[in-house]
Image: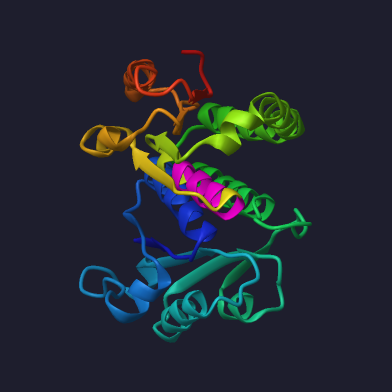
Amino acid sequence: RVYFSGSGSPANACEVLAYFCKKLLGAEATCIIPTLFDHHQDFDALNYLPEEILLICPAESGRTKGTVRVAERAASRGIHTACCTFNINGRLADLCDVALYKPSGREVALPSTKGHTMGIFIFLLCFVEAALATGKIEEQEYRLYIDELYTSAQCMEENVQTVEDWFTDNQVEVMDSGCYWFIGYGANIGTAKECALKFLECARRPSLAYELEEFMHGPLAAVRPNDMVFFLMAETGAERSRMAELAQFCTRITERCVAVGADV
């Protein structure tokens, strides 16, 4: 039984990581915001022994009070804990059985993104290694995952440049938009939420994130001609073609439709 907990961007990282924890390890995984964990919910002590539970906190500074309190409660009950953080000597790192240092360095300017991406990458590596060690995946599948992670790291600077070039070409439309929508599926539901948070912090305008099907059950009706809609389509699977159809449909409402990860 694995619990993921964090506030802000770490909460969105938790959603991505929980998805892969279930997929790679077959573990029951849940994301809970620290304040909800602290006041309204608890570890499942009825169905699991303390040694069968793991708390993972993909943190930044490791000083956020809610996350620290959740880790304190877990430690007091003998529940295993792990975190990643810039401050390996901080309170959260001190509480956790395993504290992983983020080697990405601190962000030069806010809003921050680099450290959160590194946190996801670090724990994905851990999940892949754990899946191999526990026999959940074979050596061939393991090598495929490792190769993909290496490729992701090698492509990072190129991807950043691509985004910068895109923004330079489209900055008038981006900054003139009334509302930003981010639509995702699968692991990228957490990515969509993180995108919305960063756009809100940067542009100070309404920024909303939805799962593909949930977006079509109501929120779609609120999209306006001057809104910008981002469709996150990097992940292959059954939903990708449906997302492409939705993106095409939305062009009837607004010309500012952006497909990320696939040509539509």
Q: Give the range drawn in magenta.
A: 191-202
Please indicate whether residue 41 sits to the left or right of residue 13 in the image: left
Q: In which quarter of the image is residue 38?
A: bottom left
Q: In this view, does 192 lie above or below 12?
A: above
In the image, 233 versus 181, the foreground residue is 181
Q: Looking at this view, is 39 or 26 the one in front?
A: 39
**Looking at the image, residue 182 lies above or below residue 193:** above
Give left or right: position of 128 versus 154.
Answer: left
Residue 134 in view in this figure: no
> Magenta region, mostly helix, strand or loop?
helix
Q: Which residue is drawn at 35% across and 46% down?
A: 26
Write down the quadrant of residue 187 in the picture: top left
- Location of the N terminus by quadrant is bottom left
Q: Nearer the viewer, residue 244 or 88?
A: 244
Q: Which of 111 and 27 is in front in this view?
A: 111
Magenta run includes residue 246: no
Residue 52 placement (x, y as % from top left): 36, 66
Q: Position of residue 75 (x, y in %)?
A: 47, 81
Give the vertical position of 133 relative to 90 (above or below). Answer: above
Looking at the image, the residue that sits furthest to the bottom is: 76
Q: Which residue is drawn at 61% across and 77% down?
A: 63
* Side (left or right) of 36 relative to 106: left
In the image, what residue occupies the spot 62% across and 82% down?
A: 91
Marks counted in the figure total 0
Return the x and y of residue 138 as percentages of the image width and height. Answer: 49, 32
Task: Locate residue 60, reporting x and y percent.
Answer: 63, 65
